[in-house]
Image: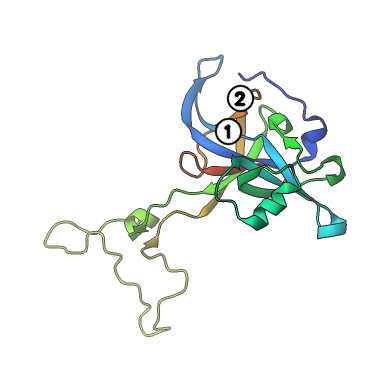
Amino acid sequence: MWKLNFSSGILGMCKGLIGKKLGMISIYTPEGVQVPVTVVQAGPCVVTQVKTNETDNYNALQLGFNEKTKNVTKPLKGHFEKSGGKCFYKINEFPVENPGEYEAGQEVRLDIFEVGEKVSVSGISKGRGFGGTVKRHGFSRGPVTHGSRNVRKPGSAGTSATPGRVVKGKKMPGQHGNKRVSVQKIQIVDILPEENIVFLKGSVPGCTNGYLEIKKAQY
């Protein structure tokens, strides 16, 4: 698994792909070392729009992933008709060095990555609802003996007479998770180009079947 290598070719100019998290498994290296990996279905992504400096003041590719057949609004239908008529659940933009090499409707696949390469992975973390300070921020508990009633309460939050208010940014109970999270320098352990599957070392943000953005680590 560790010796596969794919040349980037003409599509190597694209900086990333959209993927879907399928879950986690363990694999073993030829030396017998167990490695936890996240299995991600990455692509194929379809170029839905090519943006250039002349028209949009920046170079980028708008990619679509996971074809959608129902509940598509008319404005999106008109937009997708320019790239072949297929509609998608997920759309993201990725920088590209030479947008002239691409055209609407073209597919971008996993051959832009190589085994051993390190990438940046972004996604929406698992939503855990309203959480207290112990669960949300890792605060310590209070004493549980001698009649204490302050076991998991956050305690005092004020600042006495000066400035006499709660300081902005104070760690307090609130919404836990369901935020965009990026993890840097995730190593690609293996690539299965025929199945559009990539194995990423360790864990990545999000729940099973959640969408991810896999980007080259250069940016």
* Whole-percent x, y for residue 114 in the image: 70, 29
Left or right: 95 in relation to 92: right
Above or below 148: residue 194: above
Q: Amino acid at mark 2?
A: Glu
Q: Say which residue appears at 47% left-offset and 27% top-offset.
A: 25
Above or below 30: residue 208: below
Gap in angstroms between the C-alphas marked 2 and 1: 8 Å
Q: Residues within 10 Å of mark 2 (few under 14, many from 20)?
A: few
Q: Answer with the quarter of the image where residue 118 lies.
A: top right
Q: Give the labeled residue for mark 1.
A: 41
* Whole-percent x, y for residue 77 in the image: 67, 51
Left or right: 25 in relation to 92: left
Q: Say which residue appears at 64% left-offset and 45% top-offset.
A: 87
Q: Which mark is residue 60?
A: none
* Whole-percent x, y for residue 70 in the image: 55, 46
Left or right: 130 in relation to 19: left
Callout 2–callout 1 Cβ contact below 8 Å: yes
Where does the N terminus fall, quadrant-wise? top right
